[in-house]
Image (cartoon, grey):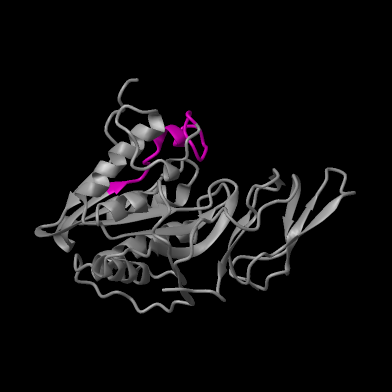
Amino acid sequence: MSSLPPIESTVISGQQPGPHLLILGGVHGDEYEPMAAIRKLITLLKPGEFSGKVTLVPVLNQSAYERCQRCGPDDLDLARTFPGAPDGSITEQIAHQATQLIQSADYLIDLHTGGVISDLAPFSGYCLHSDPAILEAQRTMARAFGLPVVWGTTATLEGRSLSAARDANVPAIYAEWGGGSQCNATAVTGYAAGCLHVMSALGMRDEPVPDQPIQYEIEDNRDQSGHLQLHNNAPVSGFFEPAIQLMDTVQAGDILGTICSPLGDEVTSIKASQTGVVLGIRTLPYVKQNEWLVVILETDHSAS
């Protein structure tokens, strides 16, 4: 199998020495707000205004981006393929190159959205790393990013950019915001600002980190916590109509929406399996059985 060209990136170095921050977008080819935000950062970052080095990758998964899809032509999910393989399929090779980038960095920010099928509320997250110093650095980064929800989850999920960072002892956060086959301008601006705030928190910029209130700050170390597609999935195929909005609070058993047949003569009510706040909603109406519908951040169960 032919090897891939190097990942397209822009490296901007400050005039003073300091940390190396890696910012990734486009892990999934249909997540557009991160791509635009990172291109915006390329124009905003001036070498005389920060210390250290920033590596910016707007579109990590080029093969998936060119298909307007989450995954590339081998149908592997890049966010489940780290650390990859240098002689593997196209997605495995991308994961391998990205893992090397992560290993070269001091900090990682990985930006995501709900892609073409869903919309996500703004939140930042991190894994509950076993090293107390790395865990505290990740908490600092996630809080500084300035989004209303901060979510710490199990460190045992494999195949992610964050698991590659975990294994390299690189403090890392991810963020989710937007999606639904669009490029939300508010999310683009907010993502660019959030990255700058993290740079300030890491001592790379002299600007202070704005004091922005966090509505929910949850740490949940249960097995599979942070796996967004695990709960509230479709019991049948059909046309999904949500009955809730992002950031609504719900109780287990509340109606999240309905799935109906083409003629509307068969209607299935979807009930919440968790109590908490709605972080994600499927926006693409047609859904296949077992595909996810709603992401709920559980607020009645947290563990440190």
| 65 falls in the magenta region | yes
Please state which of residues 206 and 48 is positioned toward the viewer in this rendering: 206
| 205 falls in the magenta region | no
Please state which of residues 90 and 157 is positioned toward the viewer in this rendering: 157
Report the magenta stretch's main SS: loop
Quadrant of the rendering where the N terminus is positioned: top left
| Residue 111 relative to residue 248: left or right | left
Q: For the point 40% across and 38% down, which residue is it?
A: 61
Compared to residue 90, the image places residue 199 above or below, namely below
Q: For the point 22% across and 67% down, which residue is it?
A: 202
Q: For the point 49% across and 53% down, which residue is it?
A: 113
In the rendered structure, which segment of residues is drawn in magenta? 56-74
In percent of width and height, residue 195 lies at: 32, 61
Residue 150: image quadrant is: bottom left
| Residue 298 relative to residue 218: left or right | right
Specify whether residue 24 is in view. no
In percent of width and height, residue 172 lies at: 31, 59
In percent of width and height, residue 59 lies at: 38, 42
Quadrant of the rendering where the C terminus is positioned: bottom left
Q: For the point 28% across and 29% down, which residue is it?
A: 5
Compared to residue 159, the image places residue 47 above or below, namely below
